[in-house]
Amino acid sequence: MKTIALAIAATTIASAPASAGIYINAESNDGYTGSEYSGRTVDVHVGYEGSVSKFDYYIQGGPAFTAVADVDGSNQELSGKLGGTFNVSQKLGVYGEVSTITNDGEDRSYGTKLGAKFTF
Protein backbone atom coordinates (compact mmCIF):
# COMPACT_ATOMS: atom_id res chain seq x y z
CA MET A 1 0.00 0.00 0.00
CA LYS A 2 2.82 2.44 0.85
CA THR A 3 4.53 1.63 -2.45
CA ILE A 4 1.37 2.46 -4.40
CA ALA A 5 0.93 5.73 -2.49
CA LEU A 6 4.57 6.71 -3.14
CA ALA A 7 4.23 5.85 -6.84
CA ILE A 8 1.09 7.99 -7.14
CA ALA A 9 2.75 10.88 -5.28
CA ALA A 10 5.89 10.66 -7.44
CA THR A 11 3.83 10.60 -10.63
CA THR A 12 1.76 13.58 -9.48
CA ILE A 13 4.84 15.63 -8.59
CA ALA A 14 6.66 14.73 -11.81
CA SER A 15 3.66 15.65 -13.96
CA ALA A 16 2.82 18.92 -12.17
CA PRO A 17 3.53 21.97 -14.34
CA ALA A 18 6.28 24.25 -13.07
CA SER A 19 4.50 27.35 -14.31
CA ALA A 20 3.86 29.39 -11.17
CA GLY A 21 4.98 29.77 -7.61
CA ILE A 22 6.19 31.81 -4.69
CA TYR A 23 9.91 32.12 -4.00
CA ILE A 24 12.47 33.91 -1.81
CA ASN A 25 15.41 35.67 -3.47
CA ALA A 26 18.35 37.03 -1.48
CA GLU A 27 20.88 38.99 -3.52
CA SER A 28 23.98 41.02 -2.69
CA ASN A 29 25.19 43.70 -5.10
CA ASP A 30 28.57 45.41 -4.57
CA GLY A 31 29.59 48.59 -6.41
CA TYR A 32 33.04 49.63 -7.58
CA THR A 33 34.48 52.51 -9.58
CA GLY A 34 37.79 51.25 -10.91
CA SER A 35 39.27 49.51 -7.88
CA GLU A 36 37.45 51.77 -5.38
CA TYR A 37 34.64 50.12 -3.43
CA SER A 38 31.54 52.37 -3.29
CA GLY A 39 28.95 50.31 -1.41
CA ARG A 40 26.65 47.33 -1.14
CA THR A 41 22.93 46.61 -1.33
CA VAL A 42 21.48 43.36 -0.03
CA ASP A 43 17.92 42.57 -1.18
CA VAL A 44 15.75 40.05 0.64
CA HIS A 45 12.71 39.61 -1.60
CA VAL A 46 9.60 37.50 -1.67
CA GLY A 47 8.34 36.96 -5.17
CA TYR A 48 5.90 35.25 -7.46
CA GLU A 49 6.68 33.84 -10.91
CA GLY A 50 4.52 32.29 -13.56
CA SER A 51 3.97 31.64 -17.24
CA VAL A 52 1.22 32.46 -19.70
CA SER A 53 1.65 30.94 -23.15
CA LYS A 54 5.08 32.16 -24.39
CA PHE A 55 5.52 34.74 -21.61
CA ASP A 56 7.36 34.05 -18.32
CA TYR A 57 7.02 36.74 -15.65
CA TYR A 58 7.98 37.59 -12.07
CA ILE A 59 7.34 40.22 -9.44
CA GLN A 60 9.30 40.48 -6.20
CA GLY A 61 9.91 42.92 -3.39
CA GLY A 62 11.02 43.42 0.18
CA PRO A 63 13.66 45.05 2.34
CA ALA A 64 16.98 46.24 0.93
CA PHE A 65 19.90 46.91 3.25
CA THR A 66 22.33 49.49 1.91
CA ALA A 67 25.82 50.41 3.08
CA VAL A 68 27.97 53.14 1.53
CA ALA A 69 31.77 52.99 1.62
CA ASP A 70 33.41 55.14 4.31
CA VAL A 71 30.05 55.77 6.05
CA ASP A 72 29.26 54.15 9.40
CA GLY A 73 26.04 52.16 9.61
CA SER A 74 23.56 51.05 7.02
CA ASN A 75 20.05 51.95 5.89
CA GLN A 76 17.01 49.81 5.38
CA GLU A 77 15.06 50.64 2.24
CA LEU A 78 12.31 48.92 0.24
CA SER A 79 13.00 47.56 -3.22
CA GLY A 80 11.21 45.62 -5.91
CA LYS A 81 11.49 44.18 -9.41
CA LEU A 82 9.01 43.35 -12.15
CA GLY A 83 10.15 41.50 -15.22
CA GLY A 84 9.54 38.92 -17.83
CA THR A 85 10.70 37.04 -20.88
CA PHE A 86 8.83 36.60 -24.13
CA ASN A 87 9.96 33.32 -25.67
CA VAL A 88 10.04 34.11 -29.39
CA SER A 89 11.16 30.54 -30.08
CA GLN A 90 12.78 27.67 -28.18
CA LYS A 91 16.17 29.33 -28.77
CA LEU A 92 15.35 33.05 -28.57
CA GLY A 93 13.92 35.03 -25.66
CA VAL A 94 13.47 38.78 -25.27
CA TYR A 95 13.49 39.94 -21.65
CA GLY A 96 12.96 43.09 -19.64
CA GLU A 97 12.95 44.26 -16.03
CA VAL A 98 11.97 47.39 -14.10
CA SER A 99 13.41 47.83 -10.60
CA THR A 100 13.01 50.44 -7.89
CA ILE A 101 14.36 51.23 -4.42
CA THR A 102 13.52 53.90 -1.86
CA ASN A 103 16.29 56.34 -1.01
CA ASP A 104 16.15 57.37 2.66
CA GLY A 105 13.33 59.87 2.12
CA GLU A 106 14.82 61.29 -1.11
CA ASP A 107 13.60 60.62 -4.65
CA ARG A 108 13.07 56.95 -5.41
CA SER A 109 15.62 55.32 -7.74
CA TYR A 110 14.53 53.33 -10.80
CA GLY A 111 16.31 51.02 -13.20
CA THR A 112 15.43 49.21 -16.40
CA LYS A 113 16.89 46.26 -18.25
CA LEU A 114 16.13 45.09 -21.79
CA GLY A 115 17.84 42.32 -23.70
CA ALA A 116 17.69 39.20 -25.80
CA LYS A 117 19.12 35.75 -25.15
CA PHE A 118 19.89 33.24 -27.89
CA THR A 119 20.82 29.69 -26.88
CA PHE A 120 22.66 27.21 -29.11
Image (tube, rainbow, N blue to C red):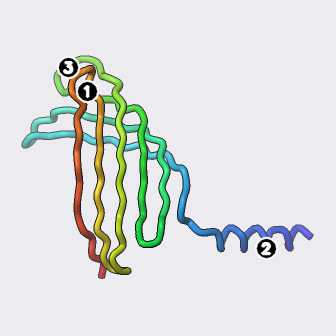
Q: Where, quadrant-wise, is the N terminus in this rendering?
A: bottom right
- How crowded pointer 1 is (Cα within 10 Å; few <14, some 14-19, many 20+) is rated as some
Q: Residue at position x 24%, y 31% from top? A: 108
Q: CA distance from mark 3 to mark 2?
A: 58 Å
Where residue 43 sits, quadrant-wise, is top left
Residue to which mark 1 is pinned:
103
Q: Residue at position x 79%, y 72% from top? A: 8
Q: CA distance from mark 3 to mark 1?
A: 15 Å
Residue 71 is tagged as 3
The residue type indicated by label 2 comes to Ala
Asked if marks 2 and 1 touch (Cβ < 8 Å), the reply is: no
Residue to which mark 2 is pinned:
7
Q: Position of residue 18 (x, y in %)?
A: 56, 66
In the picture, measured across the screen, residue 113 lies left or right of residue 88, that is left
**31, 99: nearer the viewer:** 99
SS of the residue under disc 3: loop
Label located before the other in sequence (2 or 1): 2
Q: Position of residue 58 (x, y in %)?
A: 42, 54
SS of the residue under disc 1: strand
**35, 20: nearer the viewer:** 20
- Judge depth for marks 2 and 1 and give the one in front: 1
The residue type indicated by label 3 comes to Val
**31, 36: nearer the viewer:** 31
